[in-house]
Amino acid sequence: MLDYHLHLWPHGQRDTAPTVEELAAYCERAEAAGVREIALTEHLFRFVQADRLLRGFWDDEPDPSLRASMAHYWDDHARADLDAYVSCVLAAKDAGLPVVLGLEVDYYRGRMDDVAALLAGYPFDVLLGSVHWLGAWRFDDIGDPVSMAQWSARDVDAAWGEYAAAIGELAGSGTCDVLAHPDLVKAAGHRARAPEECWARLVEAALSSGMAAELSSAGWRKPAAEQYPAAGLLERLVAAGVPLTTASDAHGLPDVADRSAELHRLLDGLEVRTLRAFRARRAVDVPVDAPVARP
Ligand SMILES: [Zn+2]
Ligand SMILES: [Zn+2]
């Protein structure tokens, strides 16, 4: 098993400099849960380098309350130094910890070439591609009343359609390696009447881009109350031959490798025997249960 989606800081917490000891504790907790390799995948938007590149991406959002909410959220997050983060993860690798260097990258319409150019300057092993917002609407931010009120104001089916379109565009940009939490649009508990239409577009996005898809336990900690992706989407991804990673999306030590045994059972049920790991953004398929060879 892998835990290929890990953060250092909870949302809303002021960022402290990461340490190798902190990563060693993540590895220890992962190992105890049968997870052999972890990827640190902090959000790109937590770093001042992203602030310089992407600040104001929300300016064309027509709803002033969503614009203001995103500006506030951004200011609250874009504070850490990407170079210090990368150095720390590389030091952990050098110390022999089973860690790879990753990042969780949002979809910024029309700006992905700039994002790719920034990231090309760093030795990433794996880049997760995520859609957490449509325009400036953070549809999964269940702690934000402004964002959650939108679910009553909008058509749920249309939101799912917009989400699938954004995932398609993100995949088409070729910027990232793994579709993180593929059906995140359900996070707040709102489900399309016919999710199969959205699922088909998500499978197509993975197939046409060659991206892997993430099997994540994080949905169990949200109103969605199930893993990402839903069983029906997971079956379709596996049937289509899309490779998988496994992940907790922990934002701190307690959730590292969360419910890895449940994820393992889902893989067993679909007879999935390999997972996709990454080295320097190249795919390496590894047996679900075997240790991952170190470079
Ligand atoms: Zn995410
Ligand atoms: Zn995440």
Image (cartoon, helix red, strand yellow):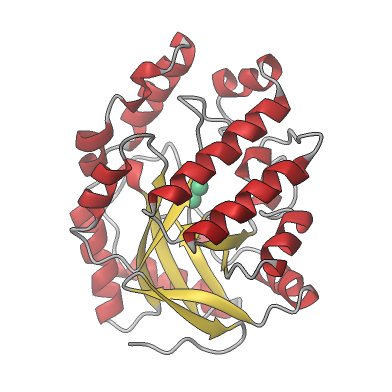
Comparing 161 with 103, the one in front is 161
78 lies above or below 10: above
The quarter of the picture where the C terminus appears is bottom left
The image shows a total of numbered marks equal to 0
**167 versus 179 height, above or below:** above
Q: Residue at x 70, y 55 (%)?
A: 227
Q: Would residue 188 be found to the left or right of residue 133 on screen?
A: right
Q: Give coordinates of residue 248: x percent, y percent.
A: 57, 60
The image shows residue 273 at horizontal and vertical percentages of 66, 83
- Can you say whether 155 is above or below 193 in the image? above
Residue 181 in sight in this render: no
Q: In the rendered image of this protein, does residue 56 appear above or below residue 177?
A: above
Q: Is residue 37 visible?
A: yes
Of residues 295 and 77, which is closer to you in this image? 295
Q: Residue 185's x, y, as percent?
A: 63, 39
Residue 128 image position (x, y, % from top left): 44, 56
Q: Is residue 262 left or right of residue 254?
A: right
Point out the residue furthest to the front here: 208
- Quadrant where the N terminus sits is bottom right
Q: Residue at x 44, y 20 (%)?
A: 69
Image-based side of 38 in relation to 263, left or right: left
**Residue pictured at 62% horizontal, 19% vertical:** 150
